[in-house]
Image (tube, rainbow, N blue to C red):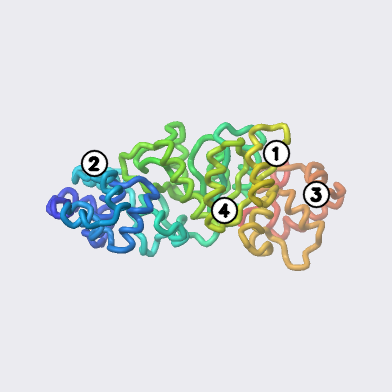
Amino acid sequence: MIDELLGDAETMAAVDRVRPDAEPVETLARVAWSVLSEPGDGVAGALISQLSAHEALRLVLNADVFALAEKSIQEGRRRWLPRAHPHAVRDALRGGAEVGARLLLPGDTDWPESLDDLAAHAPIVLWVRGDLSAVTADARVSIVGARAATAYGDSVAADLAGDLAATGTVVVSGGAYGIDGSAHRAAIGVDGRTVAFLAGGVDRAYPAGHQQLFERIMASGAVISEMPCGAAPTKFRFLSRNRLIAALGAATVVVEAGWRSGSLNTAGHASSLGRPLGAVPGPVTSAASAGCHRLLREYDAQCVTSASEVRELMGLAQDASSGTQPGDDPERVRLLDALSTRTSRAPIELARAAGLSDDRVRSLLGTLSLDGIAERRDDGWVRAGE
């Protein structure tokens, strides 16, 4: 298969476009494996880590050598062989080249090393459209939740994502309707960066209604998939995609989730990886928050109600991320917690949220404005992004 692909000029031209200055044999082999295997295939991952992608592919395609392989590899071959066609690899490369995608391989400078924590279940390749630096930023948080979000959930997700993105944290999510979309849009709204993991190829927008959102994400952040271009999202691929969302973030926050929400799958991956896990509480009567309450009760998730608590969950120094200083006035800290980078709030609203008098809030706002931390708008005050 590899020899046939190496001899195809159009295929090699596509390799040069998606993977400049690449070693073509290993690149083609890894793309082939991304076509042959489903995401997170631990047998394929272990085989590649032991032999290299090219040698593993030769083993699988060589019937004589393959007959000596262990049972798990023989079973894997029966899954992989029906997809072992050079034209499928060629189409994936051409599709990536046509949309300007970049192919990342493990060990690359831009490869997010946190994904290696998945061991044999780590992605074989990543297709990226957008700014590669967003993938390797120092501060990343995963925010996920229900597709059928309530107004409460959308509002909380937007406030958290907006506040975090405004101070340099990259917001990671899955590009879906509901909480995911609210988190992505809020990050973009404060000129922050966000990353969307897709369950299908990066050449197709899913859901289709988020086509424009993905374009906006790519302007400063990135859209990523381990699936080859042309691949369609499936239920299994959505669940497999969740492990990447959990692995990329320094912490995972579930904003709103039903009792059996797919977001709990992401939370489970975060927990198994040892990533801090947070959950936003909701009304006890709301079925949309039942999953979050379950995480708090049964899975040792931390209760999260503000961006400052998310930063604490991530292990970020509070004075570096929210404008507070060591030994800062407690009233000032409370006011900062009440301020949003996204939603303007009148002094009286801030007074109620912070538990301070209206006069004290107005005095502190003046000081924060001089320090460049708070900003006055026509309809209220917001916290200024860094």
Q: Nearer the viewer, mark 2 or mark 3?
A: 2
Q: Determine the secondary structure under disc 2.
A: helix
Relative to the observer, which residue lies in front, 144 or 240? 240
How far apart are labels 1 and 3 at the CA level?
A: 20 Å
Q: Residue at x 31, y 58 (%)?
A: 47
Q: Determine the secondary structure under disc 3.
A: helix
| Amino acid identity at mark 4 | Ser
Q: Residue at x 49, y 60 (%)?
A: 137
| Label 1 or label 2, whichever comes before in sequence order | 2
Tag 1 and tag 3, C-beta contact below 8 Å? no
Q: Tell me the quarter of the picture where residue 204 sits.
A: top left
| Label 4 or label 3, whichever comes before in sequence order | 4
The dot on residue 371 is: none
Q: Nearer the viewer, mark 1 or mark 3?
A: 1
| Label 2 or label 3, whichever comes before in sequence order | 2
Q: Residue at x 73, y 36 (%)?
A: 284
| Amino acid identity at mark 2 | Pro
Callout 4 crowding tier (Cα within 10 Å): few <14, some 14–19, many ≥20: some
Left or right: 230, with 381 as reference point: left
The dot on residue 82 is: 2
| Amino acid identity at mark 3 | Ala
Q: Which residue is mark 4?
A: 271
Relative to the observer, which residue lies in front, 292 or 157? 292
How far apart are labels 4 and 2 at the CA level?
A: 35 Å
Callout 2 crowding tier (Cα within 10 Å): few <14, some 14–19, many ≥20: few
Q: Residue at x 76, y 42 (%)?
A: 346
Q: Determine the secondary structure under disc 4.
A: helix
| Label 1 or label 4, whichever comes before in sequence order | 4
